[in-house]
Image (tube, rainbow, N blue to C red):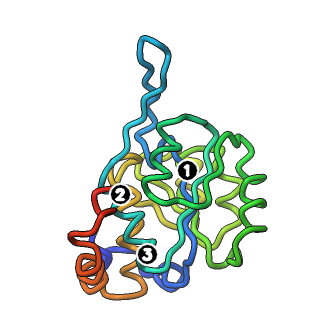
Amino acid sequence: MHPAAMPNHIKAVAATISLVILDVDGVLTDGTLAYTESGERVKNFNAKDGLGIRLMQSNNIEVAVITARQSPPLAKRMQDLRIEHFYTGYDNKLAAFEMLLEKVSFDESRIAYVGDDILDLPVMRRVALPIAVGDAHFTVKDEAKWTVSQLGGRGAVREVADGLIGARTDVTDAYNRFLAHHVGKSGLDKA
């Protein structure tokens, strides 16, 4: 989605967002839970979503993650993306949200949450900009102020990044600044 396609009624709110909270299964992944023969969980992440996270971070939008599941691949992905606020193993995402609020200086009016299923609703109801991925459960779409067209684990987070950055500045300029700063430096390959 080109940032200009963001619904007009949310552009003003989107321009003020300083913190985006992401769910994992169904948002950063497609929700598939794969297991190897030895019982290890395997997670697939989308590089476009990873770059979207890096782009938000480079444009003064902090990123946090709250998820119900725990896994070593997920912890490694969070480390690669330099996600400082990472809450894993929380079916009660509102409890993790409260802990996050104690650590950050952002008011709920400057926070967005991206979710896909009913465990996300309690936090979505508290933030200024609740966002649903394209294949979210209908109850989540009903309560979201913005439903992106991309599916979870298939570019939804990148669409969120493009929209939020585009609501506050020219996206092409922002991305050219990112490229000028990061091309040839270690870390770009961590998307």
Q: CA–CA distance between discs 2 and 3?
A: 15 Å
Callout count: 3
- What mark, if any, has residue 4 been given in the picture? none
Instruction: Give the secondary structure at mark 2.
Output: loop
Compared to residue 35, the image places residue 26 above or below, namely below
Instruction: Give the secondary structure at mark 3.
Output: helix
Q: Residue sitting at 55 percent across and 67 percent down?
A: 20
Q: Nearer the viewer, residue 130 or 101?
A: 101
Which amino acid type corresponds to the residue marked 2 in the rendered image? Answer: Ser
Nearer to us: label 2 or label 3: 3
Nearer to us: label 2 or label 1: 1
Q: Earlier in the sequence, mark 1 or mark 3?
A: 1
The percent coordinates of residue 91 (x first, y second) are: 70, 40
Compared to residue 54, the image places residue 65 above or below, namely above
The percent coordinates of residue 29 (x first, y second) are: 42, 42
Taking the image as shown, residue 151 lies to the left or right of residue 62, namely left
Q: Residue sitting at 74 percent across and 45 percent down?
A: 92
The percent coordinates of residue 36 (x first, y second) are: 41, 17
The percent coordinates of residue 15 (x first, y second) are: 49, 84
Identify the residue under disc 1: 23
Q: Are marks 2 and 3 in contact (CB under 8 Å)?
A: no
Q: Residue sitting at 50 percent across and 75 percent down?
A: 61
Identify the residue under disc 2: 149
Identify the residue under disc 3: 164
Compared to residue 40, the image places residue 156 above or below, namely below
Q: Are marks 1 and 3 in contact (CB under 8 Å)?
A: no
Which amino acid type corresponds to the residue marked 1 in the rendered image? Answer: Asp
Image quadrant occupied by the C terminus? bottom left
